[in-house]
Structure formats: C-alpha cells, structure tokens
Amino acid sequence: MIFPICMNKGLLFNHLPELIIISLKCISSESDLLVKLARKLKRDKNISHDHQIFRDIRHGRRRLSIFESYFNIDTDCLELNFSLEPTPQNIGSWYFLKSFVKSFQYSDQEEAIALKYYWSFLEAHCDLEHTILDELSSTKNIELVESYLKTWLNIETQELFELDSNTRYVYLVKSVMYWAALFELFLELEFNTTEYSYLNKVLPTFNEKINKLSLSTEQFLINFKKAWSRDEYGYANERSIKWAELYRDIAKKRMQDPDITNPPISSNSPELHDPDITAIKKKFDRWRKGNTLISMNEMRNFIAILRVPFSYSGDELRLSQCLFINLFTFIQLQGLKLDIDLKQLSDAFSNYERYKAMVNRRYKTYKQTLKLEP
C-alpha cells in the first residue's frame, strides 16, 4: 500500500487516495510518488530514486521535518480549520482530500473566484466525513453507518457490511461514481463548458446474446474511433472505420510529429503510406481487454495525437478524464475477480447520470446556503 491504512479509511471517501494513485497509472510506490512530485516542484528531471531522502522512505525512515525542508513547505501553514481536532480514530481519506484542497491555489484571481464555492463545497464533504468518523469511533453504531450511506450515497441496502461481496461491490461503485461526479463538476466550472464531461459515455455495457462485458476503457476507445470516423471520414450515426484504419492514422501522426519521431518521417516516404501498426494494435488490444490501464503519457501519445501535436497536449487537465476511465475499469476488473454477475456489474454503473444530478443539486444548494445538504 502506498498510503497508510488510516489515510484510506472512510465511508464516503473509502480508499480514495489508493484508488486515485492506481488509476493515475504513473506511480509504483510512495517513494516513486515523491520522486515525481519533487521533479515537478523543483523543475529538475535529474532527481532520482537514489537520492538519500527517497532511500530513507524505502527503508521506513521518515521524519516530517525532512520533508518540510526538502520540499520547502510548512505544514503548519495549511490552516485546515477543524471544527474538532482530528484524532487517530477519525483520520481518514477526508484528511488527505482536505489537505489537497487547502494547498491547491490559483495564481489567477478570476479563476480563484470562479472555483471559490467549489473548493468550499469539497471541504464541507470532508468535514461531514470527519464528523461521522468521530461519532463512529465512540459509538461503534453500524446503524449510523447505514443511515449515513443511505443519505449521502443513496444506498438502500440495510446491514451493508453484513452482506455478500455483491452488496459491497455496489457500495464501491456508488462511491466512485460520486467522486467522478464531483470531478466532472470541477472540470465544468474550471473550463466553463461540459465538453470534457463524458464519463456517461464510457459506462460498461453487457451483451446478453454473447455474454460479453465491455469495460469502460473499451467503451471509451469505441467512442473515440466513432468520433474520428465522423470528423475525419464523414461517417454518420453508427458507421465507423475499421480498427486497423484507426491504428494507421495514429501511426502516421506519430511518425510526422517531431516530438515523437525525430527526425519526422517525410511525407513522400513509403513507410508513411503503409506504416507498421503491430505495436499500436497490441496496445489497444490490451486496453480493450482491461489487461492494462491508460497512462496520461499514453493518452497523449496514442489518443490526443490524432487531434493535436504532442507538444500541444501538455495541458493534462484537459485529458484528466483518463483518471476516472481507468478508475471505472479498475473497479469493474475487481468485480470480475469477485465473480460478480456480469449484468449486475454493468447495471451497477447505470445510474451515473443520477449521481451527476445529485452532486449538481447539492452544489447549487450549497452556493445559496453555504450548507451541505442531502
């Protein structure tokens, strides 16, 4: 585990940090996370895992003062504003999320104002979770858990934690859908458009005739191919180019991009007219089957490259739906491991639009009242 158990604890945000890191598909350990964070913050690509501070982390030698000095931060300045002081019993994922919100600031004042209520809205969720975990640490009341999850995640099942893996799976799916709805609300406020909110189009589907489940990653790639068929080839409705044609188009774009192929292939080269697509096909096959998730760099290299040069896709926030496509797929793969019925597995995600509406309604009410209400 990259994060301590206490930092993954929660009800509304159960295992949020761990699942987000898995879905990013770019972090292999706590040490790896900090190395990559250090490279970003210090703008130094030469920082490596061999530095003493990261060797100490791998061997379990960690001191807060060392982190503060190395990253030039002061944890006392975060001002998390607790209504009640956290204790070991009520620390959980909410603390991780609230710390992130408090440390995330815009330099552009207009953007800061536009997202002011959103960050406060997220903090209110953290405070809600903090309160319920504190109550549970003293009362151990399971009925309180059931009431809380019914109210905030719309889970109807009674005695949630006494039932089988199917019920627990549905709980996890509903949690993840709620997080996704919160994230898409952020994208809509950040970019003032719904253009980047399309997780409703990548929900898993189940074909009863052939007993096949199509995972979220596969749904994303199918829709990606359809959109390219429409925009580049003029196909309408459900008509689409073949996968091999898509792979050739990707190969050609990559071969002509100086940031991927240096020097780029000449437009007169025979290699460009009949490119080798074997590696691209294998990569797409693995993604479609759920054998691997899509990293942000792969999203830029093999997806966004059709639309924009590699150097233009550096604004990774606009590609960040990849995070929740991966997360949806990862949860579906866990369902397969638990032998969840394929139709039930697919149906569990079918109410995503309902969670979007729930989050948007709660946000609208919060802006008016500054209170988080069900």
Image (cartoon, grey):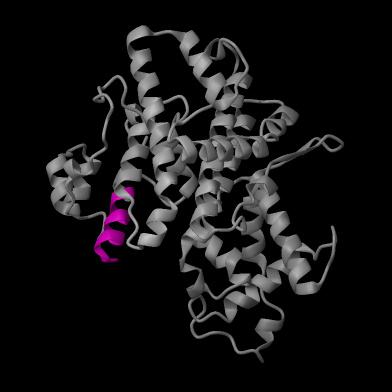
Q: Splitting the image into 4 quarters, where does residue 221 fall? A: bottom right
Q: How many marks?
A: 0
Work out whether 231 lies above or below 65: below
Confirm whether the magenta stretch covers residue 369: no
106 left or right of 304 in image: left
Residue 5 % position (x, y)? 35, 27
In-image side of 196 versus 78 (left or right): right
Picture coordinates of residue 113, whole percent (x, y): 40, 54
Q: Residue at x 58, y 30 (%)?
A: 174
Q: Nearer the viewer, residue 301 or 271?
A: 301
Residue lying at 68% horizontally and 31% vertically, measured from the top left: 345
- Along the viewing direction, whichever of 37 and 209 lies nearer the viewer: 37
Task: Pick whichever, 176 or 193, lies toward us.
Answer: 193
* Quarter assignment of residue 279: bottom right
Dominant secondary structure (helix, strand or loop) of the stretch shown in magenta: helix
- x then y, percent, for residue 237: 85, 60
Residue 179 in sight here: no
Left or right: 16, with 7 as reference point: right
In the orientation shown, which residue stands out farthest toward the front?
Answer: 368
Magenta part of the protein: which range?
33-46
* Identity of the residue drawn at 58% across and 66% down: 304
